[in-house]
RNA sequence: GCUGAGAUGCCGGAGUGGACAAUCGGAGCAGUCUGUAAAACUGCCGCCCGAAAGGGCUACCCAGGUUCGAAUCCUGGUCUCAGCA
């Protein structure tokens, strides 16, 4: 039984690779795949308005349940009429389960305690303690009303032993089952594949998650410190097990050079902080790399960031101007940079899509 | 002109006899960033040698002096600011 109003169709398959084009249908509209999914952790893709996101041809973005739960609080979002109404975004939204924060908050400080039943978080705002379980994560995501939910999982850091990864994976699988059991069909739910960099665990996980009645597959536990070769290998192991008719989301990946690789593996959507974060640091995509617009050499440079780029930033402003804005820390800098980087990402993907159509 | 305050590295600004090449900001320079505690973080930041440890040199307005030792104390300059005439 599929989630209400949710379906996926593959429209084209590449003959050269596992790449495919498709459409994810959701109650808030369609998502053409492959697609880059910008991250808007706290119900905002930093510095952009929803209208700007739409103009960039973004159809789906990523919000974090843990962050929404802490602030503004789910009661506020419910009062607003759900996440979509709260943010004034009428296109689809995908929410994270909170699973990644186990990894992320534990990395720097001990803000997290993991047990088999669930996880105790200490709020990064005020230190107050909160418990997330598969059941509460599903409940919270339902309260948010996002279109795609992710099962509660345990993301292992790079360097864990096989034994640790196995223990964590067992937990993730139990949590996957529990997530599914209590979730309902009002929204789509993706199961999360883990297993670190171990072939047997990854394959086991891919097989298991594929066997359950999820609406889609999420691959987690990558881009946590392993090499790009290792990441590609994980995709090699895992992707053949996935049902063709289900969409696959790769969690947290999306550096420029990752894109062709992940698409060739048959990934349909992928989210990543990198393009928007780099933008805010002044790193702007150009010629398949990023230029640091803060550098002095750009001070008198009257060219656009990228000559051929048709984004709002490149059409209207020079490198010199964007350089200036960053140097004096004007807020417009972050916005113009973010617009450019998302546009750049989307342009690359559109290009790859058309390539898949042709082959 | 009188009275008072002060002059510190690119800038702001600590330090008021040894632990000072000099706290801390800012600027500058370099680097990091992949399900965002990120408009963040890290390093360098007098000159020379060294990968580093470390060593050498020149330094806290100028000129003298006291002292084993001075950015710090004394004398005399120069300049700046505030108040009063």
Image (spheres, rainbow, N blue to C red):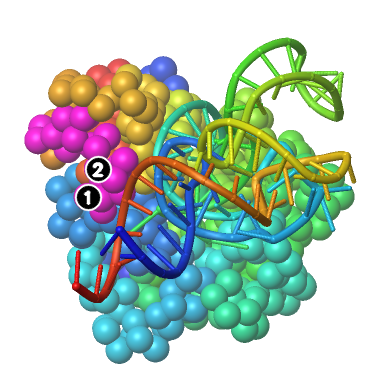
> Percent position (x, y) of residue A6?
32, 61
Front-lying residue, A278 or A12: A278
Task: Determine crowd level at label 2: few under 14, some 14-19, many 20+ residues with C-alpha closer than 10 A.
Answer: some
Q: What number of labels is visible?
A: 2
Residue at x 15%, y 23% (from the top left corner): A302
Image: magenta residue range:
A313-335
Instruction: Indicate whether A119 appears above or below A198.
Output: below
Which chain does the numbered disc 1 sit on? A
- Picture residue at 39% right of the left edge, 24% below the top: A289
Mark 2, chain letter? A
Q: Is residue A174 in sight in this rendering?
A: no
Where's residue B78, x and y in %?
38, 40
Q: Hey, which quadrant is residue A225 in on the image? A: top right
* Whether label 2 touches label 1, CB < 8 Å: yes
The residue singled out by tag 2 in the image is A325
Query: Would residue A49 be visible to someone looking at this image?
Result: yes
- The N terminus of chain A: image quadrant: bottom left
In the picture as drawn, the residue positioned furthest to the left comes out as: A316
Residue B26: % across, % down:
43, 49
Name the mark on residue A212. none
Q: In this view, does A318 lie above or below B78?
A: above
Nearer to me, A179 or A315: A315
Q: Which mark is residue A332?
A: 1
Identify the residue at image location x=29%, y=45%: A328
Residue A292 image point, x, y percent? 38, 30
Q: Nearer the viewer, mark 2 or mark 1?
A: 2
> What quarter of the picture does the C terminus of chain A occupy?
top left
Compare marks 2 and 1 and give the one earlier in the sequence.
Answer: 2
């Amino acid at each position: 039984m599929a989630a209400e109003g949710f379906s996926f169709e593959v429209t084209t398959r590449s003959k050269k690779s596992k790449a495919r084009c498709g459409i994810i249908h959701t109650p808030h509209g369609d998502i053409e795949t492959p697609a880059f999914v910008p991250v808007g952790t706290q119900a905002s893709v930093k510095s952009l308005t929803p209208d700007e996101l739409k103009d960039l041809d973004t159809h789906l973005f990523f919000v974090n349940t843990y962050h929404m739960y802490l602030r503004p609080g789910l009661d506020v979002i419910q009062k607003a009429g759900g996440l979509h109404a709260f943010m004034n975004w009428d296109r689809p939204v995908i929410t994270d389960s909170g699973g990644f924060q186990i990894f992320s908050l534990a990395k720097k400080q001990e803000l997290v305690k993991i047990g088999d039943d669930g996880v105790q978080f200490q709020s990064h705002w005020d230190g107050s303690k909160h418990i997330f379980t598969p059941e509460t994560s599903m409940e919270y995501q339902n309260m948010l009303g996002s279109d795609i939910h992710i099962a509660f999982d345990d993301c292992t850091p790079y360097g864990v032993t096989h034994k640790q990864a196995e223990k964590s994976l067992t937990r993730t699988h139990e949590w996957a089952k529990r997530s599914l059991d209590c979730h309902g069909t009002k929204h789509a739910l993706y199961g999360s594949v883990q297993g670190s960099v171990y072939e047997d665990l990854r394959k086991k996980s891919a097989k298991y998650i594929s066997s359950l009645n999820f609406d889609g597959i999420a691959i987690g536990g990558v881009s946590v410190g392993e090499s790009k070769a290792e990441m590609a290998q994980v995709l090699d192991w895992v992707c053949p097990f996935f049902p063709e008719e289900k969409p696959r989301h790769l969690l947290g990946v999306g550096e420029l050079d990752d894109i062709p690789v992940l698409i060739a593996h048959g990934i349909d959507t992928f989210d990543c902080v990198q393009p928007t974060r780099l933008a805010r640091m002044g790193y702007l995509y150009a010629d398949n790399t990023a230029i640091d617009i803060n550098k002095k050499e750009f001070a008198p440079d009257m060219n656009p960031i990228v000559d051929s780029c048709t984004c709002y930033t490149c059409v209207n402003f020079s490198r010199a101007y964007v350089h200036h804005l960053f140097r004096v820390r004007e807020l417009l800098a972050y916005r113009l940079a973010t617009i450019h980087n998302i546009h750049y990402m989307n342009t690359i993907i559109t290009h790859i899509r058309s390539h898949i159509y042709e082959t």
